[in-house]
Image (cartoon, grey):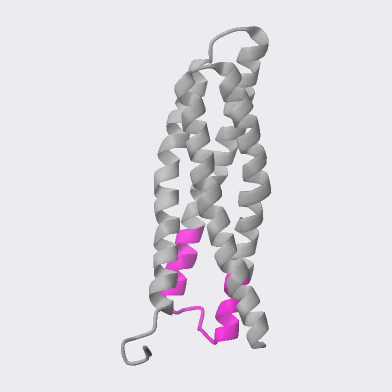
Amino acid sequence: MTDMMMLALRWAHVIGACVLIGTGAGIAFFMVMAHRTREPQVIAHTARIVVIADMLFTASAVVVQPVTGVMLAAGLGWPFQTPWLVTSIALYLFIGAFWLPVVWMQVRMRDLATEAVRSGSPLPRLYYRLYAWWFAFGFPAFGAILVIVWLMLATLLPQPAEATL
């Protein structure tokens, strides 16, 4: 693999990580702020946009990350059983186990809030239960992605004997 191809893969991999972290943090912020209003109209509008953003940005990055990661590992000659790669892949699957239900919850909360607006009624109890689960699921998933970034960066740092000034 050429140096330019490796650089392009690294760039795509880092951008994908930025998109995952940034979109995740942004979605969480806007959903929490909308939820705090307790206004079905605000929540329905925000959740509608959040679902679109998750499908457009997060889902795209979810595909880009493993593709670029596998290509980078192969291009750099790293065995896939390297401990930090195994840990990163396990954490990535762990994140997915939280993200997939979160997407479903966001769609459901959007629909419940939209129905409350249409009917002029308050948000149902189910909305609040889903929100509590949605909120709780964010912490382990977001923490795990931060650990993956740490593993990636710590592994790529030059060792003291290799460092140059």
Report the residue that reaches farthest toward the top. Answer: 120
Taking the image as shown, residue 114 lies to the left or right of residue 159, namely: right
Who's the residue at 49% across and 66% down the image?
89
Please tell me whether residue 75 is drawn above or below residue 9 in the rendered image: below
Residue at left offset 51%, top offset 22%: 127
Residue 130 seen: no
> x and y percent of residue 79 in the render?
50, 83
- Horizontally, is 84 left or right of 64 in the view? left
Occupied quadrant, residue 43: top right
Give the prevailing secondary structure in the magenta stretch.
Answer: helix
Above or below, 1 against 81 in this view is below
Does residue 115 lie above or below 60 as drawn? above
Q: Which residue is nearer to you in this view: 160 or 133?
A: 160
Which of the 4 image quarters holds residue 122?
top right
Please report the bounds of the magenta region as a residue range. 68-92
Query: Residue pushed farthest bottom?
Result: 161
Q: Residue at x 62, y 81 (%)?
A: 6
On the rendered image, what quadrant is the N terminus found in? Answer: bottom right
Residue visible at 54% across and 60% down in the picture: 17
Depth check: give the residue in front, 137 or 23. 23
